[in-house]
Amino acid sequence: MGTAEEAAVEAEKGRPLEPARRRTDVLVIGAGLAGLAAALAAAAAGLRVTVLSRTPPEGSNSARAQGGIAAALGEDDDADLHASDTLHVGAGLSRVEAVAVLTREAPAVVRALADLGVPFARRNGTFRLGLEAGHSRRRIVHTEGGLTGRSVMAVMAAAADRHERVDSHHGWEVEELVVRGGRCRGAVARCGPRRVRWDADAVVLATGGFAALFPRSSNAPETVGSGTVAAYRAGAAVADLEFVQFHPTVLALRGAPALLLSEALRGEGAHVVDASGRRFLFDYDSRGELAPRDVLARAILEEVDRRGEPCAYLSLRHLEAEAVRRRFGALAAALAEAGLDLARDPLPILPAAHFTMGGVLTDLDGRTNLPGLLACGEAACTGVHG
């Protein structure tokens, strides 16, 4: 009888087989941008890395990102101004040291991604920078067509596949972290009937947030906080779990998925209007459509409730149609499948859960309070977001 049959028999008896044992230097749980970046960094240091994930990189939340990456690359910009904008949007709750690291290192990270092969949009050899809410300068590096996340993840996944010291396994669910002697020493994971215990010198948790727990969410359905729960059960501290960001402009069309309508749309001039076509956001904030996401999400919900309307609308009909379709080609195609023209139709919108601010508490190097366990990406709470 084969391994799968043995597992099935034992499961029926209520006695699951003891997991097989594997060994690696670094175990990375999660194959989004944070997980693959950690894996490649560890491999570059000469370590053997195993990546476990529920879905392949193209199915991660990172691949869903549309707008781009913020970095102070413009001639009229610098890291201090980027930090100031970030702290302002964080409403005084951001960790200043974490914001400083993020804004100082962002330009080098973007250039490294470009060197790796990410096809960021350029004009005359320099990055073409977009504008998004909360930023006082154009600093959003992006790819053409509104597929920044997908483009970045394709390049990162290819780099991980090429690396001889990175071994990736998709379709695996982590059941628990292994803790012995007060240190995280690996994890037990399942793929169908197979259970494997990976022993490791270090475990990097990069499992994303938990925004898919909400009825309306822009997230992949797997984004339910399983990594955060596993870390908490193992003894790691968590923080700021009550801080969940709601994206203000998510498609609200009956029978259609909650499609994210990128912030970059508003950065390029899209208007948020009511059923009569009136721009109402200036009633709530002088920055209008370019106010921070939390401000806009509350304003849209308040206005919809006040007027007794089912939704608000995002409108680009005042912009040049071909330029809109060229800049946001992928989004235009997705909306066309739902019977909507991005450049001409009022797009029904409501806020939806988008990003988890809190998570597993870390220091500035990703270390948790549990030795041997690190966390990065949306699974981590660094304090940068407020």
Image (cartoon, grey):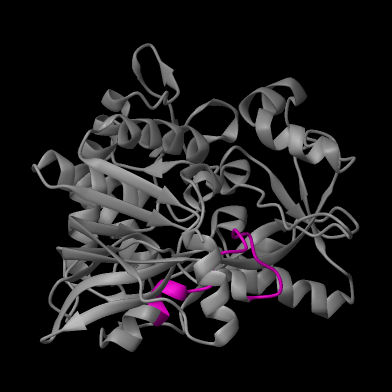
The image position of residue 14, as x and y in percent, is: 54, 87
The picture quadrant where one finds residue 207 is: bottom left
| Image-based side of 94 in relation to 355, left or right | left
Note whether 292 is above or below 111 in the view shown.
Answer: below
The image position of residue 96, as x and y in percent, is: 20, 68
Note whether 70 is above or below 351 in the view shown.
Answer: above
Which residue is at 22% across, 33% downward? 164
**Segment colored magenta:** 214-229
Which residue is at 42% across, 23% downward? 119
* Main SS, magenta residues: loop
The image position of residue 183, as x and y in percent, is: 13, 80
Which residue is at 71% across, 68% downward? 300
Depth order, front residue of 332/235? 235
Q: Can residue 287 be seen at all in this image of the molecule?
A: yes
The picture quadrant where one finds residue 350 is: bottom right
| Image-based side of 21 in relation to 154, left or right | left
| Image-based side of 167 in relation to 138, left or right | left
Depth order, front residue of 27/371? 27
Which residue is at 70% across, 69% downward? 216
Depth order, front residue of 42/265? 42
The image position of residue 264, as x and y in percent, is: 56, 42
Depth order, front residue of 46/248? 46
Q: Can residue 292 be seen at all in this image of the molecule?
A: no
Q: Is residue 23 magenta?
A: no
